[in-house]
Structure formats: structure tokens, C-alpha cells
Image (cartoon, helix red, strand yellow):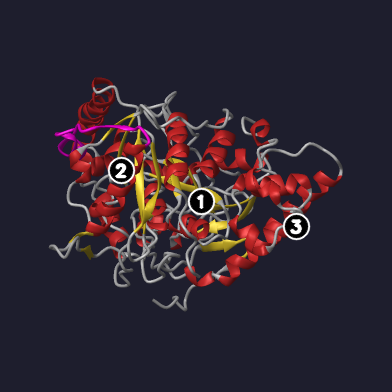
Amino acid sequence: MTRRTTRRTFLAAGGGAAASLTGCAGPGSLFASAPTVAEQRAMSSSQALAAIRSGRLSAEAYVSTSLVRAEQLKDLNAFIVLDRAGAVAAARKIDALRSSGAALPPLAGLPIVVKDNINTRELPTTAGTAALRNVRPGANAPALQKLIDAGAVVLGKTNMHELAFGITSTNLTSFAGPVKNPYDTQRIPGGSSGGTAAAIAARIVPSGLGTDTGGSTRVPAALCGIVGLRPSVGNGGAERRYDGAGVVPISHTRDTVGPMGRSVADVALLDSVITGTPLAAAVPLRGLRIGVPASFWAGLDVQVASVMAAARDKLQAAGVVFVEVDIPTLAEVNNKVSFQLALHEPIADIPAYLAATGVKGIGLADVAAGVASPDVKGAFGAILADAFGKDYDAAMRTHRPRLRNLYDGYFRNSVLDAMMFPTTIAPAPLIDAVNGSGKVSINAGAPADTFGTFIRNTDPGSNAGIPGLSLPAGLTSGGLPVGLELDGPVGSDARLLGIGLSIESLLGALPAPSL
């Protein structure tokens, strides 16, 4: 698909992990001299940080490599704003700090990308929609601020499904355009955090931030062959792992910022900095009890089924104990929670965000009127009509607690460390240039709604507020990534990351896309 000619890329003018990084450079420590451009693109976050700390690589050189790569691959439409001047200036400050002999913060010089619904003080926050195109927040979102304080360099704001209301990232807003999958540019990257996923998979940066309401970090992670974490949200209070302020909202009950990276270690590093907790440690696979819910494995694309079967065989050979146990009523209960929250809470949450961000003269109706993508326009029609308002109280008071109890009982009664399933039931479909939604057919079956198909396995855990981690399981015979998801009880994020580290080590990394 050709890049939309109406799209413009704007160039803006403008501590738990620290100790663990020392002496743990990994393969990056083997470079005797400055890493080549090819080596820089292949480096993990910790390898790049080790090279910067040692002086073998300047932060400015590394950030410049990322900026050049972003320009070379601009037809992916991964970015809405690329902050060349700001990123270079931030990198030079890191280099000056290192030259002075001062201690470097844990992410010193690490370029990251940020989904464009996460507030940034130096750049607009558009959420990929016309009404918010000129919104300039006065402060960074708290989760992002933690990374910046730790020395991360914001390369730019990434493209997304308009207002995060979808899973294709086929954004039809004039200044955005459809994001493309680096493994096949005729296909979607997933969404709504598709730009962040595409930038990471394309080796522009090793990691970045997305957001997740019903699968928006994990679906694009699966389809682009990277790693995405949805952290615990739980009751939204003490059980919430990340501060959720400063994000253009869908649902305060369901929304969360989520780190994304080329490896589980990259994601664990960002998680450690955001939470101020120690880096997750690998959890031995032998003896782990992993639930395999049949309903999550039903109706899979044959290629996804093949890749997942191979991954499961390797895990079983490594000593994982798979427990065949389902949650029979899960879908029924989830259907009484999902849209009831996502299409009612924006009525209050979007105006509250606009007020908190200091946006004047723009209301919910103005945001809805500016929507360009037909599928998102349909969602806002339901929001403005409050089509699910009558069901909201029951969803919050009765059905969401039931959903949480189903998950709690599932993990407790079968003594499970986690549950495992394919993140999505099919690999990335072709871009639908007409409306960004359309239909998808699995195994030449009857066409089904794309949105419902691709959130089928990620949505229930989102509504229950439990953590979920998607990591690559392998490639189809056609070279498309397949994602494997681990879900666990509320608060088990670090353990999920530890299990993910061991699974990733066993299954191996995916080859880079050919771009």
C-alpha cells in the first residue's frame, strides 16, 4: 500500500535497574571499538547502555543512528512527530555527563519512542486525531517522566489507531496514515500501539511505550514479533502497577501504559525503572505449572497453531507442566464488562483529561466530530448516545467482580504459575485501506469482525485487570510473527517477566525483518 500523500512528518525544534546494569553488558561488552551502525541496530537496550557507559559509543552517535533509521523507514508511518533537535540535545547532555566522570542514570542515552496518546511536555499529544492535533501538555505523563529522569531520550511520538479505539493502526487522519508492519508492509502492525511496535521491530529503537486497554500493547507486539507488557491494574488503586495519569483515555478502569521492547529483558528494564523495583530475574522453567485454557486455543489459524504447538513442545521438554484446564463461562461474563466500560467511561474520562491537561475550547463532541477513521467514528456514535450506560453499574458492581473471581479461582484451584495461549488467533492480515476495520477470514472460513477476532484472547484479562505479557513464539512459514501470551494473577508482573525471560531464552529471538 502506498503512503498517504497527505501525511506530514513534523520535526520538532526543540532506580531499581541502575545497579543491575553494572557488569551485565552481555554481548555488547565484546565490542573492542565503536559498534558499527549494523551492530547498533542489533543491540538490546542493556547492550547499548553498556556501550555508552564504557565510552565505546556516544549517546549522540547512537541517537543519530536511530534518527537516520527513522528517516529511512518513514514510509512505515511509525511516527507522527520525530524530535530530531530535542533528541540530539538530550544525547549531548548524556555525553557531557559521562565525560565529566559523573555517575550516569540507568537509562543514560537510551532512545525510546512514545505512543502519541501519552503526554509529552516538549511535543504535541494528538492521539492521532484532528481535534487534538495542537494539544501541548504542560507536563510529561508520570510513567514517561520516570524514564526521562533515568536518562532515556525521547526520539519521537508514534502513530496509532485513532484515539486508541482499534487494533489495526490503520489511521485515516490526514497527518497520520496507516502504520505498516515491518515484516510485511502490506499488513497491519496491530494496534492501537502499532507505531511503537513498528519502530521497535524495524530496529529504529530497542524499546518504547504504548498503552493497553483491551490488547493494545500485546496485539501489536504479537503481530510485529516483539514483546509487550500489560501491567497489573487490578482495583485501580494499590493494585495498579503504573501511574495512569497523563494519557488520553478510553476507560480509567481498563487503561494502562505498557512497555514494549525487542526482548523481554528490554521490557523488564523499563518496568524496573518505572516501578523503582529490582529487575525481574529469570524463573526456571522446570516444574512450572502453566494453565492451557482450551477456549483460548480454539479456532486458531493453522499457521498460528503450528508455531504454538512447536513452542509448547519445547517448553514441555524443558520441564514445564501444562495443566489442561479451561474457564468455561469466561467469554459470557467478559461480554458483560468489555464494551460496557470502554464505551461509557469515555463520556466522563475524555473531558476530565482535557481539563487536567489545560485544553480549552474542545469537548467530547468536538473530539468525536474530528474523527476520520470510520470504525472509530462508529465507536464514538455509541459513546455519544451512551448506548451502554444502562449496563454500566451492573458491569462494575456485578460482572467485573465475577470476572476477577473466575481468574482468581483458575490460578488458585489448579495451583498455576500462569496461563499460556496465543496472543492473537491469526497472524497479521492485510491492511484494509477502506475503513481500518473490515473483516478477516480464518482458515478460509466465513469473514469475521477484525476487531473482535484480534482481541478475543487479550480482552478478558484486560477487563479483569490482571497482567499479561506477549513475546514471540516464532514465525509462520510465510515469515509472519506469532505471539505467545502469559497471564498471571494481579501483582505477579515481575514473576511473569521472569518466566518470559526463560521462555525467550529457550525459543530464541526472531530474525530482523527485511527492510
Q: Earlier in the sequence, mark 2 or mark 3?
A: 3
In the picture, measured across the screen, residue 192 lies left or right of residue 155, that is left
Label 3 secondary element: loop
Q: Position of residue 290 (x, y in %)?
A: 31, 32
- 334 up-or-down from 278: above or below: below
Q: Position of residue 328 (x, y in %)?
A: 14, 34
Mark pair 1, 2: CA separation: 24 Å
Q: Where is residue 166 in the image (x, y as percent from the top left)?
A: 33, 55
The region drawn magenta spans 318-336
Three-letter amino acid code at the position of disc 2: Asp
Residue at image mark 3: 34
Q: Which of marks 3 and 1 is in front?
A: 3
> Can you tell which mark lies on residue 313?
2
Q: In which quarter of the image is residue 434?
A: bottom left
Residue depicted at x 79% and y 49%: 55
Circles 2 and 3, Cβ within 8 Å, touching? The answer is no
**Is-magenta flag for residue 338?**
no
Q: Which of marks 3 and 1 is nearer the N terminus?
A: 3
Three-letter amino acid code at the position of disc 3: Ala
Q: Which of 218 and 300 is in front in this view?
A: 300
Q: How crowded is mark 3: few (under 14 residues within 10 Å), some or many (20 or more)?
A: some
Circles 1 and 2, Cβ within 8 Å, touching? The answer is no
Q: Nearer the viewer, mark 2 or mark 3?
A: 2
Q: Which of marks 1 and 2 is nearer the N terminus?
A: 1
In the picture, measured across the screen, residue 393 lies left or right of residue 37, that is left
> Can you tell which mark lies on residue 262?
1
Mark pair 3, 1: CA separation: 22 Å
